[in-house]
Image (spheres, rainbow, N blue to C red):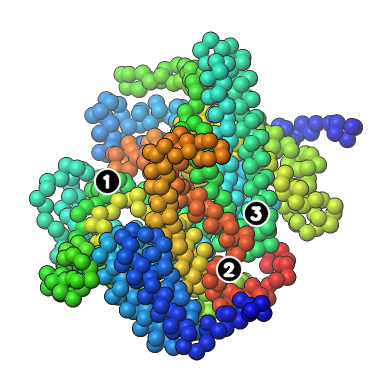
Amino acid sequence: MKKYLKPINLMELLRPLGQLIVFSLGSAAVLSIIVLALAIVLNNTAAGDKIFAQLKVSLFAYTVANLPQVLVDGLTLGFVYAAIALGYTMVYGVLEFINFAHSEIFAIGAFVGVEILIALQNAGLIGSGSSLFMDYVFLILAMLAGMAVAGGAAIAMERIAYRPLRNAPRLVPLISAIGVSFFLQDAIRLTESLTTGQFNRIFPTFGNFDKRITFGKIPMGAAELPFSVPIKSFIVIIAAVLMLVVLNYLVNATKVGKAIRAVAQDRATASLMGIDVNHIIAITFLIGGALGGAAGLLYALKFTRIDPYVGFYPGLKAFTAAVLGGIGNLTGALLGGIILGLLETFAGSYLSIFTMGAAGVEYKDIFAFAILILVLIFRPNGLLGENVTEKV
Amino acid sequence: MSNLSFKDLKTTMQSGYLPYLLAGAHVLIGTILVYLNQRSIIAFLVLLSSFFSLYRIKADMRYKLFIGAVLALIIIPVLGVRNIFYLEVIFQISVFSALALGLNIVVGFAGLLDLGYVAFYAVGAYLWAFFGSKQFYTLPYTPGSQPTDLPFLLPSDMFYLFIFLAVIVAAITGILLGLPVLRVRGDYLAIVTLGFGEVIRVLAANLDKPLNFTNGPQGITPIQRPPMPQSVVDGFNAIFGKLVGHQADVSALYNVMFYLMALGIIVIIIIVSRRLEDSKIGRAWAAVREDETAAIAMGIPLVKTKLSAFAAGASFAGAMGVLLAASRTFISPESFSFMQSIGVLAMVILGGQGSIPGAVLGAATITILNLQVLQGLSLYLSQLRQSDAVIPIINFAWKNLSSQLDPAQYQRMIFGLILVLMMVFRPEGILPAQRRIKKLASESAPNKE
């Protein structure tokens, strides 16, 4: 038993926390400065006049007053993206292949969690009258169940659709992954329709997740804008940070993590060193899938409504986040997720005002693609990626 | 009898005059079956599969072409006008065949996975939708608020010009997209093209403000069709009126016309693909597909080669887009979703990457699956639901079957299954390209890295 009781490597626990704080503050600061600069520039143009006519405040004051709320929302979203992006980046690191179906693993996690919570609500265990403590316990249990099922699904997926193709040309497993993704979307829909009669599910209201903690009021011209954060945002952030720290520890400070890194570096040599490559790849899928599943439930908690196709956009954005940070790089996925979440929220909140309604929140979904293309053109290895030459 | 193996049977069937007779009989039986049955999937399949048996028989090329032309240009239009349902199916098959052939150039020949192929289709469709409708005059109006008495921008015979314009515009779009992204590696390219497809769709759905270019999610209607002289209608009725059984009207003949146009575009694509495949550029595509690094070492200009494949594929989709806009007289962003792109990809993969007959076969199979088999099943299930029938052994009444179980709604599942199964069990497709057969035969030993 002694070999499992190694001293905990404190450094590895603290380092990702530090990184998260630096990344969050850094990207938030940079983006805020950009937005504020834009607001100053646009203050005296037609866009500024329009806001003034509507709300009797200058565009700059409006931007400043909304900033805290946008930052908190952006960070919440960013942590969800980061958790999904880790799944992409881990699989890519080990197999050099885009697991396109990761977005459906995310959806599976969301559905399993939400269905369990709905069942608990119907059984009267959560909802009105239940104790707050039990609400949290059940939320955590639902999340664990979602993680388990999603991780299992990821392993099954790897075994059935990817392992037979491991030595095939590069695009073959990718096409297979797209097939798995499409198949799973409708498989979820079919299962949901047959068991519940509908495939749009709503996260049940229970506990105090929707309650908002008010931090004060921000003056905006004559009016005051309340600055409040819903409790669920805190839950999302704390859960995501916990997962990220645990994952980081697992990969960088344990024996399994060492094996994963070895397989990622050189599969053949790792196998010669006595590492069971198939086993390690399965573990990678399990970890990535479990993270994706947890992110799914967090997403459902934040956005309430889920459907079988819910994973598509978050999946693509998380992939963009992984590429932005440098695919194959865990720290990069965190950074990419945070930046992308913030960017998207900024775009959703300010684009419409800055462009006087010509382009607004409806473009936020394609914002990620613009970033993806720009990154691939100017820095294909991502922000934190090293320069690797392709193996021939 | 026992030593007459399947192989012997095959050789007998492929020698002498027998193949001529068999193929001719197949066409004839198919024609009669479809003529007698109003709405039968099996009869229609017999007729359509006669194209395939024509393709496979060992016979004089002139005979094959002649029978094929009679089948495609006379029999199918007449049967189609007689029963418009068949014409719709065959038109869809033609459209998707053309798209699959275009994508085949990009995916099959050059090995570039394009997940946003319908974006180019959308470019063509919106090009004619904008210039061939009243949309130009509705620019200042928000959707729904425009006056009803606006004129059309261009005369309807400009349609033919726009087919060529769409080829150019789509090719330019392909080049503009390709220039920055074709430098990235294959799997990134797939995601970028996916993103591009979504960008085009979201733009189409949202460019109704500040100026109303696309009329938003409602889509543009009416879009003009090219003029159809009354003499053509009268001529058709005079010649085929007896066979059809009723007087054909203009709309039926429009369907025939668009079907024939799609057929024409398919023929052009096939000829172009064939010629390109063994040309200098086709070999460059194959080289890039097989090994980029080696291709560069051989002095092949990588980006230029990829761009040409991208542009060639895009241009055909653009032309089909114009055809779609005119034939439907209505388009909306819905028609250009990611699922459509994957559908076309599934057609190419099913038939065989790089294989021209494969692309057509894939398109026909998946279109029939979508339009006939899945919808037929849905119809059948809904009839069962209304009846009092019970599944015998498990004693389950059909009435209690969930109305959510509607096979027509589960196209994604079919596409997904096709992609996975083909990749795992038969990556070269049903009708593999010749070059790929050679390659896969020599590659039986497991690959290193």
Identify the subunit bearing mark 1: B
Mark 2 or 3: the one toward you: 2
N-term-proximal mark, 2 vs 1: 1
Quarter of the C terminus of chain B within the rendering: bottom right
Q: Tell me if mark 1 has few (under 14), some (14-19) or many (20+) residues whose alpha carbon lies within 10 angstroms of its own.
A: some
Horizontal side of A318 relative to A254 (left or right) equals left
Point out residue A51 in the picture as x, y percentages from the top left corner: 28, 31
Point out residue A278 in the picture as x, y percentages from the top left corner: 75, 51
Label drawn at residue B428: 2
The three-letter code of the residue at mark 2 reads Glu
Identify the subunit bearing mark 2: B
* Residue B187 visible in the current orientation: yes
Mark 2 or 1: the one toward you: 2
Q: Please state which of residues A316 and A330 is positioned toward the viewer in this rendering.
A: A316
Q: Are marks 1 and 3 on the same chain?
A: no
The three-letter code of the residue at mark 3 reads Tyr
Horizontal side of A332 relative to A201 (left or right) equals right
**Secondary structure under the numbered disc 1 in the rendered image:** helix
Determine the residue positioned at 73% across, 36% down.
A249
Quarter of the N terminus of chain B within the rendering: bottom right
Q: CA distance from mark 2 to mark 1?
A: 40 Å
